[in-house]
Amino acid sequence: MKEHFTLLNKQAVVLTTLILSVGAAVLNLFFVISVFGSVNLFLGSMFVLFALLTLPLRYALAVLIAAVAPVLLSYGNLFVVGVHVLEFVCVATLLRKKFRFLSAISFFWFFVGLPVTSLFLYFTLSLDFQSAVFVAFAFVLSAYASAFVSLLAVWLLPLPIQRRFSMQETPEFSKLVFELNTVSVILPVVLVTLFFAWRSAQLSEDRLNGEMSQAVQELNRSLQGMFESKIHTLRSTADIINAGELNKDAINEMLNAISTTSVNIESMVLTNKEATVIIAAPQRYAAMLPDLSDININHRKYFHDTKRTLAPVVSRAIRGRGLGNFDIVAITAPILLNNEFNGLLQAAIKLDKFVDESVLNAFENNQISVLLVDDEDSIIYSTPALGLNQLDTFVENSGPHPFSADQRAMKINDSDYLYVALENERGWKIYAFTPPIRVFEEVTEYFLLIIITLLSSMLFITILSKGLAAKIVIPLLNLEKVMSGKGADKRIIAASKISKEMENVTNNVIKYQKLSEDFQSELKAQVEDKTQSLQDLNEALVTLSQTDSLTGLYNRGAFDSLAKNTYKYYQRHKKPFTLAIIDIDHFKEINDTFGHVTGDACISEVAHLIQSKCRRETDIVARYGGEEYIMLLASDQYENHDEYVKSIHKSIEEGTFVYNGLMIEMTVSVGVLKVSTDFSQDFITLIELADEKLYESKRSGRNRVSVGEI
């Protein structure tokens, strides 16, 4: 269907498009709202929908591009970009089919947007389907909020253009009242619901973080208590042995008693200072050994640490040899003779018995898994649900989770977990893990209630709108009959007594109709004339203030302003770019030989050649001095910038400029600075560095390109 517009002028459309494009880009770049961690709401869609309602389609498409570009460049979120583009196409199509705006939005999100977003979240993230639908519903609510604000702006702002599609078929007043009531009632409900979802998820995340922090602290206290208990036992036993009052059999019997009665100690050995085992306990393990004198633990690091420090030592997780061949952690105490090392007493604790089961049961009841690794990242204990093996090396691969605001996440065996970690005084690390789905457990309980509330509100609005519209429309219909000569003044006045305002309108509308039309027509013509003149003057002043009159390039002031603002963006996003300064060689000789007019023509010719090579929107080119030019280049092919500049240099070198029958050959010297790693310098310093490269080219004989990089 053909589109119809009422435009004051084309400039108004262009200006509106520019304002909406800038607004959409700024909102999506700097004012992004986080709902669940890195799940963001991009409010620039308000400007896109507003443009769709007020501008021709091609201009609205420009606003869409401005809105999705920051999402793609800053966040790399292809899915969000795809959903916004799909919404734009679907809503534009439905508006062409004479759908009302809110009907088009509702159709898209409930039949396309919500299912697609739910399935995407379900298949790409660790969420159950209910939680995926809940998060997708947050997107739907944000879309409705954007749509409502856009519609309010269309109604309330004094636009110089009318709505694109609504003029094709004038809607019934009841539909307008319904839309107004819907926006007035549902918009606050939507905003409160979004806030509730965000706050509930945040509180749930804080609670989970507290549970996991408590788990690692409790496990650490349990471990510390176990270590202190065993070290005390070993020290006490070592003191008895050091006293020399017991013979070997008595010591053997004592170690047997300790190893069989202790909850955690699996076995014990006593060595001499050469690390040879003298006594092994308990008896059931010692009986399995052929000859104790053949067993030596000199290869164990904990033996040498004990000998060196003359203090108790707790080893890393090790694979046991000899007594049972169990995976163990060894705790030692030195045996001293005259305060010199004379051997050690060792207790072996099986990794399977390392953690108190009562503590573990409390964690698992709260859906918390734990992991304990030693100072060399060997796994001592892991909750079975994690699927990790003892003594394997644990590699921490943490990062942010999409639905967590502050909590770090880790992937273990293809499953995502939120986690808290604690490193104790021995350099061991204790991890507590919980599934991310728990963030939404409490929020999703109210999911159905939210939907019922919204549907009930819609039903109430429908009934209210019908009754209110009927009371307002009848006087308006009577007034329309009077104005068309089909009704009597007395009837319209009687019917208009619904309100004082309606009565006043009825009494005065005919009287002032003609006067108002004449006044509005004259005022409109004057405003249009003044607006056009002011716009033309502003455009001329902007062009004059930024353009070099000789070359048509930016002048120095315009370049400094544009380039500095561009550099701030590159600094924030660490985006590589290239700065190049070009100077015509021996230009004074050209002026002296051919005259200043010819020299000016040469300057213009070089400027034209540079400008013909720099056609990308990201290129900024200016005349920076008499015969000096400056360029700021940025593109995805950053590594090719120096070759790009060299091609300009080569084109000037190989070309011949003909002016007034004179053949003039020119060369240029170029200084190039590529910025890819160091963004700490101010922009003036960068220009100075590029200028140094220019003078390096001149000192080297001119007609060359010198490249530097920081």
Image (spheres, helix red, strand yellow):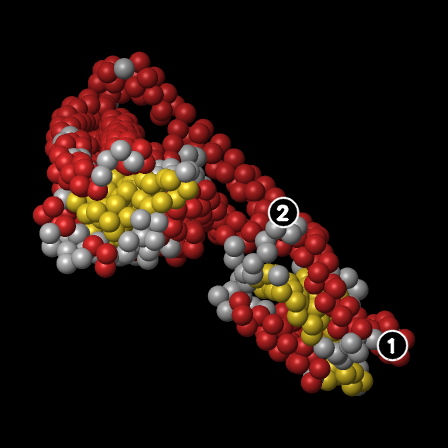
Q: Decide: is 400 above or below 487.
A: below
Q: What residue is shown at x 17% (from left), y 45% (from top)?
A: 281
Q: Quadrant of the C terminus?
A: bottom right
Picture quadrant of residue 554:
bottom right
Q: Position of residue 656 (x, y in %)?
A: 73, 84
Label 2, secondary structure: give it.
helix
Q: What residue is shown at x 12% (from left), y 38% (from top)?
A: 260
- Image mark for residue 538: 2
Picture quadrant of residue 296:
bottom left
In the image, 50: left or right of 691?
left
Is 339 in front, or is 351? 339
Q: Decide: is 76 above or below 33.
A: below
Q: Decide: is 6 above or below 221.
A: below
Other residues around mark 2 within 10 Å, as few (<14) / some (14–19) / many (≥20): few
- The three-letter amino acid code for the residue at tag 1 is Glu
Q: Position of residue 51 (x, y in %)?
A: 38, 47
- The three-letter amino acid code for the residue at tag 2 is Asn
Q: Decide: is 323 above or below 362.
A: below
Q: Position of residue 289 (x, y in %)?
A: 15, 56
Is 460 in front, or is 270? 270
Q: Quadrant of the N terminus?
A: bottom left
Q: Position of residue 683 (x, y in %)?
A: 66, 53
Q: Is residue 507 visible?
A: no
Q: Which residue is mark 1?
A: 589
Q: CA separation, marks 2 and 1? A: 40 Å
